[in-house]
Amino acid sequence: MTLSLDKAQTIVAGALDYARQNGMKPVAIIVLDDRGAPKAMAAQDGTSLRRADIAFGKAHGAVSLGMGSRSLFKRAKEQAFFIAAATEAIGGKLIPVPGGVLIRDGGGALLGAVGISGCTSENDEAAAMSGIAKAGLAGDPGAD
């Protein structure tokens, strides 16, 4: 199974709905496929200039290393040299804070990742999880 454009757009719409319903600050959302290629993106009115780049870094880091950015956050605290080296290895596009969530199918296969930035990391992650669920897929934010 691959991540279709329709599913990616459903994820974006679901995440935007979650952000609006929960009074989140304006967010940028990007959905990447399993290769790290962009499938869908949106930025709410009022997001700051580089929010989309941060959202991309969360999703890109997650899909590149095969772990949700919550796990990358934990590794950054425990193994800063690993995160620094991994960031360099993947071209500098890794933001190791919650808000980068892997997208999996029902069997656990990796389909891509969602990155959201604009509110708190925890809220960004919750919006990503909600969008993924709206598309009928499973979100994997990583372990604490």
Image (tube, helix red, strand yellow):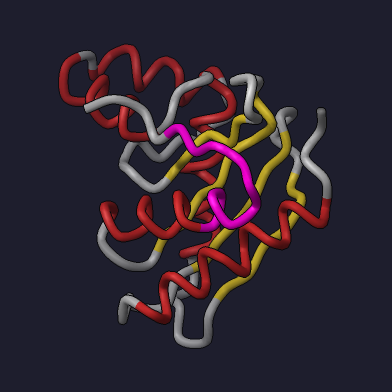
Left-right relation of 66 to 19: right
Question: Where in the figure is residue 41, as x and y percent of width and height?
Answer: 67, 62
Specify whether residue 25 is painted magenta. no
Q: Is residue 62 above or below residue 26?
A: above
Image position of 69 with respect to 29: above or below: above
Hey, which residue is sitting farthest bottom in the picture? Answer: 45
Determine the residue located farthest toward the left in the rendered image. 78
Q: Along the line of sight, which residue is nearer the eye, 110 or 91?
A: 110
In the displayed structure image, the side of residue 116 where residue 1 appears, left or right: right
Q: Position of residue 79 (x, y in %)?
A: 22, 14
Q: Residue at x 47, y 40 (%)?
A: 101
- Classify the position of the N terminus by image quarter: top right
Residue drawn at x 62%, y 57% as measured from the top left: 11
At 51% from the left and 64% from the top, the residue drawn is 15
Relative horizontal placement of residue 109, taking residue 16 as reference (left or right): right
Q: How many marks?
A: 0
In the rendering, at what x and y percent does residue 27 appear?
45, 70
Magenta segment boundaries in residue numbering: 131-140
Residue 135 colored in magenta in the image: yes
Q: Quadrant of the C terminus?
A: top left
Considering depth in this image, is 34 or 6 the residue closer to the camera? 6
Q: Position of residue 5 (x, y in %)?
A: 82, 53
